[in-house]
Amino acid sequence: MAMHSGVAIVPAIALVAVSMWYRPATPSSASQKAARGRAQRIQKRIHGGGFSGTKSLSMIQLKPELKQQVSVEMEQTPYTPAFEQLRMPGAGSGAASGCPHQAEQIAGRARGGVGGIVKVALGNLVAPKGGSYLLSDSANLGSLTVASGAELVVAPNVDLSLRALYVEGLGGTLRMGSATCPLSGVTVTFTGAGDKGARSSNPLETKGLVVGDGGLLEVFGVRYAPTWTRLSAQAQAGSSTLQLMDEVDWQVGQQIVVITTAWTDDPDDHQNEVREITAVTISEPLQHDHYGGPEYFAEVALLSRSITFQGDEASEGSRYGGHFMCMGSAVCRVAGVLAYRMGQENVMGRYAFHFHMMGDVAGESFFEDNAVRHSFFRAFTIHGTSSSRASRNVAYDVSGSAYYLEDGIEENNLFDYNLAARVRIIDQLSDYGGGGQGGGVTVHTQPSRIVPTDATAVGFYCTNAKNRLGV
């Protein structure tokens, strides 16, 4: 892994997904109608000249109300983040079929049954080689290993609490849902306080999920669409209603974040606002103004997912959360997952989501429609890996650069329709001006900041132009 001993830098600017906007003629009329079967949403259909066809605008109601105003002029566009997101392969979830956890699916394989999982010691379990095992009950474990040649299938509505989950290489397989059968109600909590000393290379001691060389991981939660959009009308401070640019399938009880439009976005003094969707109102009024107009529209992103990987509550004090790593020739397909309290601050290689030294994966491994919230170290890291993709993801409240190409040798990776917000600097400098001479400052590796550029952490960090970032 790359260790940067020192580098001369100037304050960096975070990159965000950029859309090209077409401004049509002012609509001539507007009418409202209640969306069938969705009490929490009102469609607003705009009719007028200057654009082809019509588009739906959605209105959701939240709690608590906004504290700051988010303002947007009422202008309709034929091109929005969701417009392209919903056309992408795999976007959205249809009717479930071919579910790995269903009995008839498992019966076709060498079935070991739940009783075949071997208890080793101290709550540590092993799914041994040659069997296919269904995990349908919640459990509090030490560690869980899926041996080479074994398959573990997780059923819906399972809560796991464990120190580590390891999928061995050479044929170890872990499945949570499939592309045609998204899973709901699954939470995996990684436990253990850890320390800030040297970290063991043993995957069973790293507080996270590791997929070894040659393993297979498929995790498919519900793909809500779009994962983020923009406001279509001004949201005043105190408002409990947000009018969105796109029709969404977000659900009552889910959480969203309304991105700040203020000039600054300090870690402890910011105007991003997390709210819960309700059928009638948001849980509390907005406190801040979120500017919008013909040149800029505030983003609104969905934070909730139907599968959650998270660090335990003890992670807060130590900033030593869970982590996810897929390495070598493994194949990892992850969609519709929330990573919460993941990442281990200033521990190299311990990130919320991480492709590690996988070479050219030819598009077989991807991160799609996921969310990272309150990460202690990065969101999506691609290291020594080429031709992977990260699409339609949301990264919010992240320490260190969020979407991160680690060494600069990574090529042909695709990052499209991703959102990064509230990215936190690690160990802020006392002076970013280099004494006012315009020459920048030199930042070195130190215990409180192992990667110098995290002193100016950004949403998207890429030092190799042979990758595609954008829309």
Image (tube, grey):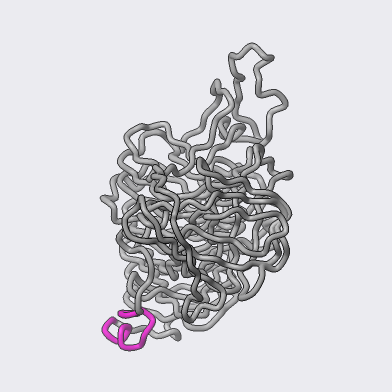
Say above or below: 406 vs 380.
Answer: above
Q: Is residue 334 left or right of residue 342?
A: left
| Residue 29 screen position, x and y as percent | 46, 61
Q: Is residue 123 left or right of residue 267?
A: left
Whether residue 107 appears in magenta in the rendering, the answer is yes
Q: Which residue is nearer to you in this view: 54 or 153?
A: 54
Q: Going 48% across and 44% down the picture, which residue do you hit?
A: 403
Q: Going 62% across and 44% down the picture, which residue do you hit?
A: 261
Q: Is residue 343 left or right of residue 83?
A: right
Say above or below: 328 vs 154.
Answer: above
| Residue 191 screen position, x and y as percent | 63, 64
Instruction: Spot the residue most to the front.
Output: 28
Picture quadrant where residue 369 is located = bottom left
| Residue 348 screen position, x and y as percent | 54, 42
Q: Which residue is nearer to you in this view: 275 or 4?
A: 275
Q: Is residue 327 visible?
A: no
Characterize the magenta stretch by its predominant secondary structure.
loop
Q: Is residue 84 left or right of residue 351?
A: left
Q: Going 63% across and 64% down the picture, which residue do you hit?
A: 241
What range is drawn magenta here? 96-109
| Residue 374 screen position, x and y as percent | 62, 54
Say above or below: 439 vs 402.
Answer: above
Q: Is residue 431 visible?
A: yes
